[in-house]
Amino acid sequence: MRRSPLPLAVGALVLAAAACAPAPESTSAASAPAGSGAASPACTPDTLPLTTSGTLTIGTDKPAYEPWFKNDDPSNGQGFESAVAYAVAGKLGFTKDQVAWTVVPFDSSFAPGPKQFDFDVNQISITPERKKAVDFSQGYYEVKQGVVALEKSKFASATTLAELKDAKIGVQAATTAFQAVRDLIKPSADPSVFNQQVDAVNALKNHQIDAIVVDLPTAFYVTAAQVEGSKIVGQFAASSGTPEEFGLLFQKGSGLVSCVDKAIGELKSSGELATIESQWLTASAGAPELK
């Protein structure tokens, strides 16, 4: 996923949980409290190799768009990725005032070289190519599919996948959306396939199709910046293929990865991560789950 420079922009679980080794004294934080939510005794502020001693420095782009952040302010804890970042920080034992944010342009985040952050959160898809230059946590978000229709369409009020069966649906060729439509919506007529996403968008604008299916981050972008009078009908998870996932990004060789993986694992097992996703990417974002 590549982030768009416009509002509401668009973009396999690694379950490694190896023990975190203490950082050398020259890079460890000084006497910061561990906090009750620490992932383990080894993964605490005073043992982690931090960019700035005693502070967890998190990078993201500016502007920081909704629904990933709220009011262009990553530090307020609102929006999906801000909430995830603070939940991870809490598991590592950091209080909110021990977290600092720094601006990192999207493309710069996964470029080779040293980083001025501990991790970056910015709708960055985990890919083999990017992993050559940087490290990733296990995925914190599995990208869903989003259905976009014109607000006046009879399909705009659909609440189930079955209600979309008779819709003429457009998809981009060679995408997970194409397979998801065939496997889960199972439309009466084969979906219209377009070489480029913009072609599908134009077909929707011109009423040549009833809806398009794209990944959810793209759906936010389409409704905000590409198709006036459109809405996200809902979202659903693909049933086959390798899911696209967003991961927290680290400098190559970072000693923080295993500790952050533990924190994300705990947030998943406790249900907290699912709750954050439901709050910020389903309820407040107006993208209900389609079953």
Image: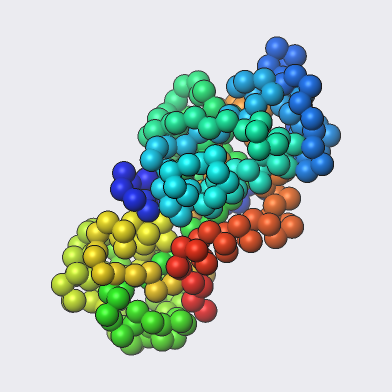
Q: Is residue 175 visible?
A: no
Whether 149 is drawn above or below 14: the answer is below
Q: In this image, 291 relative to 62: left or right?
A: right
Q: Residue at x 24, y 59 (%)?
A: 226
On screen, 173 above or below 252? below
Left or right relative to 165: residue 86? right
Residue found farthest to the left:
206
Residue that appears at 50% across and 45% down: 126
Pinpoint residue 246: horizontal percent, then vertical percent. Answer: 51, 48
Residue 268 seen anywhere in this rendered image of the structure:
yes
Observer-nearest residue: 132 or 148?
Answer: 148
As drawn, 217 above or below 213: above
Q: Give me the residue at 52% from left, 52% from top.
A: 79
**Residue 61 occupies quadrant:** top left
Q: Quadrant of residue 221?
A: bottom left
Residue 50 spot, x, y in % from top left: 65, 24
- Foreground residue among 237 and 150: 150
Question: Where is residue 147 shown, x and y percent of the image?
Answer: 38, 71
> How many tags in the picture?
0
Name the residue nearer the viewer: 288 or 269: 288
Residue 58: image location, x then y, percent: 55, 33
Front residue of 280 and 270: 280
Q: Left or right: 71 with respect to 273?
A: left
Q: Residue at x 82, y 41 (%)?
A: 36
Is the image coloured rainbow, by chain, by secondary structure, or in one colour?
rainbow
